[in-house]
Amino acid sequence: MTEEKKPLNFLEQIIEEDLANGMPKENLRFRFPPEPNGYLHIGHTKAIGISFGLGEKYNAPVNLRFDDTNPAKEEQEYVDAIKEDIAWLGYKWENELYSSDYFQQLYDWAVLMIKDGKAYVDSQTSEAMREQKGTPTQVGTNSPFRDRSVEENLELFQAMKDGKFAEGEHVLRAKIDMADDNMLMRDPLMYRVLYKEHHRTGKDWCIYPMYDWTHGESDYLEQISHSLCSLEFKPHRKLYNWFRDNVYEYSKNEFPSPPKQREFSRLNLSYTVMSKRKLMKLVEEGIVSGWDDPRMPTISGLRRRGYTPNSIKNFIETVGVSKRENVIDVALLEFKLREDLNATAKRVMGVLDPVKVVITNYPEGEGEMLTANYNDYEDGFGTREVPFSREIYIEREDFREEANKKFHRLKLGKEVRLKNAYFITATSCTKDADGNITEIQCTYDPLTKSGMDTEESKRKVKGTLHWVSVKHAIKAEVRAYDRLFNDEAPDGHKDRDFMEFVNPNSLETITAFLEPSLQTATVGEIFQFQRLGYFNVDKDSTKENLVFNKTVGLRDSWSKK
């Protein structure tokens, strides 16, 4: 039986057409070009998956290039975090490169463009330039400095580089067409003066190239074959090509292959904000504990929450590659996570809201070790020993004095199975002055031990409960997370600030009681707490104080809300 071929997405079709039209396969080269001005988030995983995925499909190199042209916002911390995130996702880059590697070459090309009359130094204020740009329906007007002589432009540009002017006093602009329908073509900025120390070049430069000038030329220098970016850059393609075609004339013998820009739709997720500026605000105002807070949509936050590389990759593959913007329900991401963890996480027992059960006919002071599988459905997970004793904890919601036939958990006079242990029957309960149940009294049937081949153990009971032995249980801090925003589109309201939709109940801290096998759990390790959900060990854990994050519940509870 032959394996069914997956249909090509539109980017793969473009590449296949280029190969069919004579592009040598060895010329294929891709890149992922993040700006190191914040942490990567779930939206970036689509761009990462597309570029690195094409690299894997075509056995082509993929560069990791940092777009580091704005030292006012960029830091080494972000560079390190981005590298860690991409490596954690399982991707390998061919070369680690920086736009700052090309500062000298970009400057040299800019000088050539001045000499060719294709760039000039403008000495207007930014406000004046903005007014002269025009509007989408009204053409712009030329700068009064547009016709400066080549000699004056060269002299001024050199002085800008030498630090002889204040910030904002002069800029270098490309000389294109102030009447172009595409406003990005109306003499865009190429360089500005900026007295900020760069995280790599230090104080070597005080002029820095603008994104549109840097981006395409960096692609060209690296001989990227297909420059893939999200749809908001589609209007930039005309300018990308104009800059590319001009530098090609200067360097075609050394760099023979000009790149092509192609665009795909961004990943937009419900109940989430993707703007780095807005994520920064959440950090700065203390709404979250940091960029890696498990409620954040950053890759580091998802990793700390307990998301797996495989679940994120499967999510991106399911979303697919398209040309049209849409919003993906965050429930799909959570479904892909459950799907992955269901196959990979060990099952253990923990009680988050405990009430004590005393098994009155179990011998006082005695106990036993029960053997339990880490996974009832898959081999290869192994077993562990779980202690059992006269006093155990169960979840408070698993007991009612009286209940209808649909309640299949513990109630007075009814029998349930304790997971991996015995059948118990509730006989009575004790309450405090406020009517809260403080203890449940039960009896057990010693002939119903899990694994026994007895008639008693074959009795049918509808309910199975998880539990932990009181005297053996370990205390742990559990951080139960909910969605950070309680609105489907928190930044989609023109008349309201996204901060108004922050969910005040997005974090609940709980003291839980866990089976003792978890005492040796290590940071990042993920478990299914049976009947409750998936939990992983947080980096705040110590041997004395285990901390677990609730990664995701066993089923989607948000839709019911």
Image (cartoon, rainbow, N blue to C red):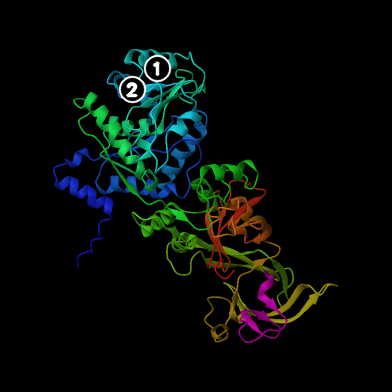
Choose between 147 and 284: the one closer to the eye.
147
Q: 225 or 168, which lies in front?
A: 168
Residue occupied by mark 1: 157
Where residue 80 appears, as percent x and y from the top left, is: 48, 35
| Left or right, residue 120 beside residue 371 | left
Which quadrant, please, contains the N terminus? bottom left
Report whether residue 222 is seen. no
Query: Eyeballing the image, is 463 above or below 534?
Result: below
Which residue is found at the position 62% from the left and 50% from the top? 499
Secondary structure of residue under mark 2: helix
Q: What percent of the width, then of the height, locates residue 380?
A: 43, 62
Q: Is residue 16 highlighted in magenta? A: no
| Position of residue 108 measured from the top left corner of the image (x, y, whole percent) | 32, 19
- Along the line of sight, the residue nearer the viewer: 531 or 427: 531
Decide: is 476 above or below 335: above
Was residue 395 drawn as part of the magenta stretch in this picture?
yes
Neighbour tally class for label 1: few under 14, some 14-19, many 20 plus, Cα within 10 Å: many
Residue positioned 47% across, 43% down in the render: 40
Numbered disc 1: secondary structure? helix
Real-space Cα separation, disc 2 to disc 1, in angstroms? 9 Å
Q: Residue at x 50, y 32 (%)?
A: 74
Count of numbered tags: 2
Tell whether label 1 touches label 2 (CB within 8 Å): yes
Residue 461 showing in the rendered view = yes
The type of residue carrying mark 2 is Ala
Q: Which residues are magenta?
A: 394-416
Q: Residues within 10 Å of mark 2 (few under 14, many from 20)?
A: many
Type of amino acid at the residue the image marks with label 1:
Phe
Q: Residue furthest right?
A: 433
Q: Which residue is mark 2?
A: 110
